[in-house]
Image (tube, rainbow, N blue to C red):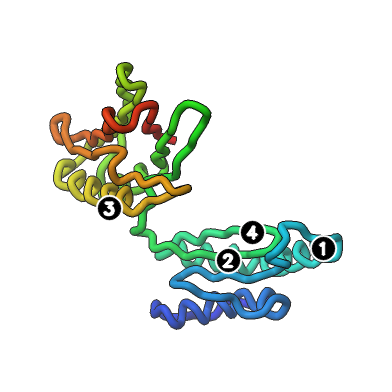
Amino acid sequence: MKHLKRFNESDDSLHIELRDSMQEFNDVFGEPTVVNNRYKWIIGDSASRWLDRDGFEKMIDTYNSIKDNALTMADRLADRYKVLFNMTATEFTIELKENDDYEFIKGIEEDIYDLNILISRSEVERWASDNGIHFDGAEENPQEEYNTTDLILKFSGTDVEEKLWDFESMLDTEKVGFDERGKELADMFFIQVGGGSNEVYLGINDDEYEDTHIKLV
């Protein structure tokens, strides 16, 4: 197995280190394409989501050959990056996310009647821990007239109000930039620090977005 080298914290060295640690993949599938800190290898016919027997065996054997290196790399970078893996029949992607990047909005879930905006509990908890405060939980606040559900996030700790203003700003920036399946969240809900300055209120704009709910998952 190819061992990882020591490296400094510059981005160029990071890219070289990751590529070197995935040399077995490079030998079989070629160099990855790199966009920012996302590395993507094409491992199958992009026109098809399916592999034949030989293609499947090749993919499994190759994944097994780089598994230890990939996990070792993820462990070594854990203090600075969250290492994410995405595997399909045609692509293998590794993405490095700075540990101070948060993805509070997990996505939008739609059923026949309602639309659910999903907020990540684990990311809220991680942000609170990183900022030296505690996430005490959440409370749903249904608005029956419009069939909507607001969400109240509750925190405790030192200098909570000041930190929650930063949280509000970060979540609002993510909300404005979020787009999934053509849906834009910018106008769907508002964010407000309140409740004695230890709560963040996420409220649906009821008059325009009925049958919409904010859920912590």
Q: Nearer the viewer, mark 4 or mark 2?
A: 4
Q: Nearer the viewer, mark 1 or mark 2?
A: 1
Mark positioned earlier in the residue sequence (1 or 4): 1
Report, in whole angstroms, how far the alpha carbon at label 1 lies from the one at label 2: 24 Å
Q: Nearer the viewer, mark 3 or mark 1?
A: 3
Q: Nearer the viewer, residue 111 or 118?
A: 111
Amino acid type at circle 4 is Met
Mark on residue 57?
1
Report, in whole angstroms, how far the alpha carbon at label 4 lies from the one at label 2: 18 Å
Q: Nearer the viewer, residue 163 or 190?
A: 190
Amino acid type at circle 3 is Thr
Image-based side of 12 in relation to 151, left or right:
right
Q: Nearer the viewer, residue 198 or 30?
A: 30
Task: Please give the residue where the numbered disc 4 appears in the rendered image.
Answer: 87
Q: Nearer the viewer, mark 3 or mark 4?
A: 3
Dot 1, crowdedness within 10 Å: few (<14), some or many (≥20)?
Answer: few
Q: Quadrant of the C terminus?
A: top left
The residue lying at 40 percent from left, 37 percent from top is 117
Mark positioned earlier in the residue sequence (3 or 4): 4
Residue that protrudes farthest toward the top in the picture: 144
Report, in whole angstroms, how far the alpha carbon at label 1 lies from the one at label 4: 15 Å
Q: Quadrant of the N terminus?
A: bottom right
Q: Quadrant of residue 43?
A: bottom right
Mark positioned earlier in the residue sequence (1 or 2): 1
Marks 1 and 2 close (CB-CB < 8 Å): no
Amino acid type at circle 2 is Thr
Marks 3 and 1 close (CB-CB < 8 Å): no
Q: Quadrant of residue 67?
A: bottom right
Q: Where is residue 11 drawn, in percent x and y?
A: 41, 78
Image-based side of 204 in relation to 32, left or right:
left
Task: Please give the residue where the numbered disc 3 appears in the rendered image.
Answer: 173
Q: Where is residue 85 drawn, in percent x and y?
A: 57, 59
